[in-house]
Image (cartoon, helix red, strand yellow):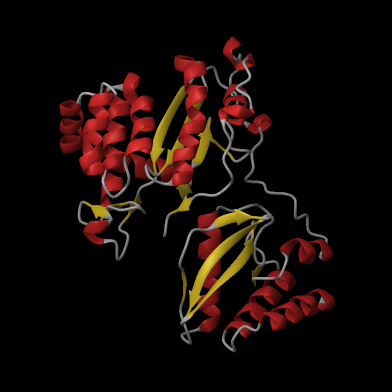
């Protein structure tokens, strides 16, 4: 153990962190390795960020404040964090199980291998064999309407929707977070209660897409596809009506729904995201189980089809690699 800690400290010294950051990282690494602070199970990126910030601020004890300044993404088997401590910005990493936090340059694979920890196990990753079976598979894809990774996931899901049609229940849901401090009217509606990362127009569009999905289901995916192609989070309030008309969506019905049902629809999305511990866009839940394998149309189809007690014949149709793939990554909520 002493050799492991010494290797970590040697690498920290080479990075040249300031006098505040060195003891923070040293203490965290020693605690994580020597005491095993967290279980061996994988955790969500949101939870990993919370662990990192809480422990750093606890160690600093008022000397400085650590905050997250960007998205939390998986990279090379770890979570990558963009942090600001005092006036210094830095990139740090935390293991997928939350056991080890370290600055740029310290490789978790090497250190965990030397402590006989299995670095290749991520218990949050569910392969097609892990999906529970039911008579009709239910797939809930959570996105932010203008998260680029979410838009890519929507595009990947469309061939699956077109193939399986009403033999599967595939729905889009939207990542809304509550009471975002500092968001204000630029990011939130209902006095700050319902917020989205890319601004208030994204919240408005989330509502409109929920309305189309509820009342004009046959127009829904075409509407979403054209919104992705034609509008942005900065202009969608003015852009959406033209897209709706072009895709056959009844504009007045959607306006009525938005006016009367926005709060109820958004609260339902918040509640559902809490149920499944959704913290970012995209996240796919199949039969109440999170799917985190490769994001491809074929991967989505295979996982969804694996959830049937008796899969429909369409499941034998290969969508192929030309149906699309997208790299790992996502838009994480700031809470």
* x 56%, y 60%: residue: 48
Q: Is residue 130 among what the camera can see?
A: yes
Q: What number of labels is visible?
A: 0
Residue 114 pos. (x, y %): 83, 65
* x 75%, y 51%: residue: 120
Residue extending furthest toward the top: 313
| Left or right of residue 301: residue 219 | left
| Left or right of residue 4: residue 147 | left
* x 18%, y 26%: residue: 253
Instruction: Report the quarter where the C terminus lies.
Output: bottom left
Q: Is residue 291 above or below residue 110?
A: above
- In the foreground, 319 or 39: 319
* x 25%, y 36%: residue: 240
| Left or right of residue 177: residue 169 | right
| Left or right of residue 187: residue 174 | right
Instruction: Report the quarter where the N terminus lies.
Output: bottom right
Residue 147 pos. (x, y %): 42, 46
- In the foreground, 142 or 237: 237
Q: Is residue 189 above or below residue 291?
A: below
- In the foreground, 126 or 228: 228
Q: Is residue 303 among what the camera can see?
A: no
Residue 98 pos. (x, y %): 62, 61
The image quarter containing residue 314 is top right
The image quarter containing residue 247 is top left
Q: Is residue 235 above or below residue 224?
A: below
Residue extending furthest toward the bottom: 19
- In the foreground, 218 or 134: 218
Residue 18 pos. (x, y %): 59, 86
The image quarter containing residue 303 is top right
């Amino acid at each position: 153990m002493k050799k492991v800690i010494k290797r970590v400290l040697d690498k920290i010294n080479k990075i040249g962190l300031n006098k505040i950051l060195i003891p923070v990282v040293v203490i965290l690494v020693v605690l994580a390795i020597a005491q095993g602070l967290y279980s061996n199970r994988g955790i969500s990126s949101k939870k990993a960020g919370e662990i990192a910030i809480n422990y750093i601020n606890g160690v600093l004890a008022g000397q400085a404040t650590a905050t997250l300044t960007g998205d939390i993404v998986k990279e090379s088997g770890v979570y990558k964090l963009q942090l600001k401590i005092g006036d210094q910005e830095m990139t740090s990493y935390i293991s997928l199980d939350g056991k080890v936090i370290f600055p740029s340059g310290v490789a978790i694979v090497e250190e965990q291998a030397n402590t006989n920890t299995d670095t290749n196990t991520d218990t949050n990753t569910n392969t097609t064999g892990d999906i529970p079976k039911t008579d009709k598979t239910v797939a809930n894809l959570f996105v932010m309407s203008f998260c680029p990774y979410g838009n890519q996931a929507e595009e990947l899901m469309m061939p699956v929707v077109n193939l399986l049609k009403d033999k599967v229940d595939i729905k889009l849901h939207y990542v809304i977070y509550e009471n975002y401090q500092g968001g204000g009217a630029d990011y939130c509606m209902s006095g700050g209660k319902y917020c989205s990362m890319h601004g208030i127009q994204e919240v408005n569009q989330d509502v409109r897409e929920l309305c189309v999905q509820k009342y004009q289901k046959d127009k829904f995916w075409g509407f979403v596809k054209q919104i992705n192609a034609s509008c942005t989070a900065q202009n969608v309030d003015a852009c959406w009506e033209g897209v709706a008309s072009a895709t056959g969506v009844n504009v007045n019905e959607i306006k009525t729904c938005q006016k009367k049902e926005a709060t109820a629809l958004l609260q339902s999305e918040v509640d559902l995201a809490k149920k499944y511990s959704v913290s970012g866009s995209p996240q796919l839940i199949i039969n109440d189980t999170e799917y985190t394998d490769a994001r491809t149309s074929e991967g989505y189809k295979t996982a969804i089809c694996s959830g049937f007690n008796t899969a429909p014949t369409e499941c034998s149709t290969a969508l192929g690699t030309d149906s699309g793939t997208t790299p790992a990554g996502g838009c994480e909520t700031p809470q």
